[in-house]
């Protein structure tokens, strides 16, 4: 069973508009959530994170929202830029657990 | 970039042959991981290590073994490669067990024919 789900394989957005990437999780023990960004032929790189004691974390154009009751988080990118075109992975961990569990990823395409 | 080097970057091999992928880090991080990335599956954990000679299985460990004889090196071995192991393999390192932030290598593209 998938513990971290990204149900949208792809998303297309125009430059300057908002991109919203969604992620759902099933394990109530998860208490730390992260987003990674991956360009072709490169390894994933950390983008932004949020702990379960918060419901929002912002870093420049990137904001992550966490809804614990719904077991849902989302990544907002405003404004979107062509350089944001990449695969975005949602990941989660439990403080008492081991390694990160990743979702399947969402490919974001930002057109100019 | 964090000091993580994966070798080789690309490899083509035949079914049934053994293959070893190497991950070398210069960050002195305690934890090291091997992930594979496949279309439709995202990143899946194969094995991880929490210290020299201390390793454990991830969610897709069948057909793989690992070894860590030094802090800086983590080897992934496919004992007898199969076509289903064609994938991109990523090594990652972290300072903590909860792996709040992983640093990834650039990946190894492995093709098993």
Image: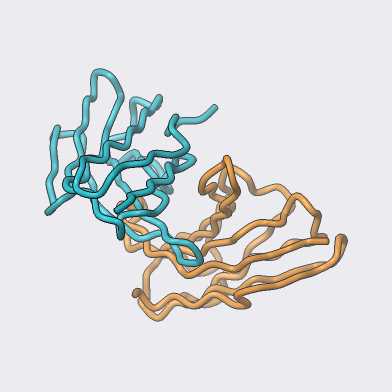
Please give left or right for residue A46 compared with residue A79 in the image.
right
Q: Colour of chain A?
A: cyan
Where's residue B73, x and y in %?
53, 76
Where's residue B105, x and y in %?
46, 69
Quadrant (top left/top right/bottom left/bottom right) for the C terminus of chain B: bottom right
Quadrant (top left/top right/bottom left/bottom right) for the N terminus of chain B: bottom left
The single residue placed furthest to the front in the displayed view is A112
Give the residue drawn at x 34%, y 38%: A94
Give the residue drawn at x 54%, y 75%: B6
Viewer-proximal residue, A75 or B50?
A: A75
Count of labels shown?
0
Viewer-proximal residue, B14 or B40?
A: B40
The single residue placed furthest to the top in the displayed view is A69
Quadrant housing residue B4: bottom left
**Up-down relation of residue A15 to residue B66 (above or below):** above
Quadrant housing residue B104: bottom left
Where's residue A78, x and y in %?
17, 45
Give the residue drawn at x 13%, y 43%: A57
Where's residue B60, x and y in %?
63, 45
Please give left or right for residue B95 compared with residue A52 in the image.
right
Q: How is the image coloured?
A: by chain
The single residue placed furthest to the bottom in the displayed view is B26
Viewer-proximal residue, B40 or A48?
A: B40
Give the residue drawn at x 58%, y 49%: B57
Q: Colour of chain B?
A: orange
Please give left or right for residue A16 compared with residue B16 in the image.
left
């Amino acid at each position: 069973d998938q513990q971290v789900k990204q149900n949208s394989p792809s998303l297309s957005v125009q430059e300057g508009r908002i991109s919203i990437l969604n992620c759902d999780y099933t394990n109530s023990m998860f208490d730390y959530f992260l987003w990674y960004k991956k360009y072709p032929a490169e390894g994933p790189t950390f983008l932004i994170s949020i702990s379960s004691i918060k419901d929002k974390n912002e870093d420049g154009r990137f904001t992550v929202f966490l809804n614990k009751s719904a077991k849902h988080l989302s990544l907002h990118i405003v404004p979107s830029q062509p350089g944001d075109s990449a695969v975005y992975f949602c990941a989660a961990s439990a403080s008492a657990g081991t390694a990160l569990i990743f979702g399947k990823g969402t490919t974001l395409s930002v057109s100019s | 970039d964090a000091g993580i080097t994966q070798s080789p970057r690309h490899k083509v091999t035949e079914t049934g042959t053994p293959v070893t992928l190497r991950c070398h880090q210069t960050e002195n991080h305690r934890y090291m991981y091997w992930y594979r990335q496949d279309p439709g599956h995202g990143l899946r954990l194969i094995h991880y290590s929490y210290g020299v000679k201390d390793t454990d299985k991830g969610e897709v460990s069948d057909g793989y073994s690992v070894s860590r004889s030094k802090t800086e090196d983590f080897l992934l071995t496919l004992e007898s490669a199969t076509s289903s192991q064609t994938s991109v393999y990523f090594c990652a390192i972290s300072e903590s067990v909860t792996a709040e932030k992983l640093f990834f290598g650039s990946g190894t593209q492995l093709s098993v024919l």
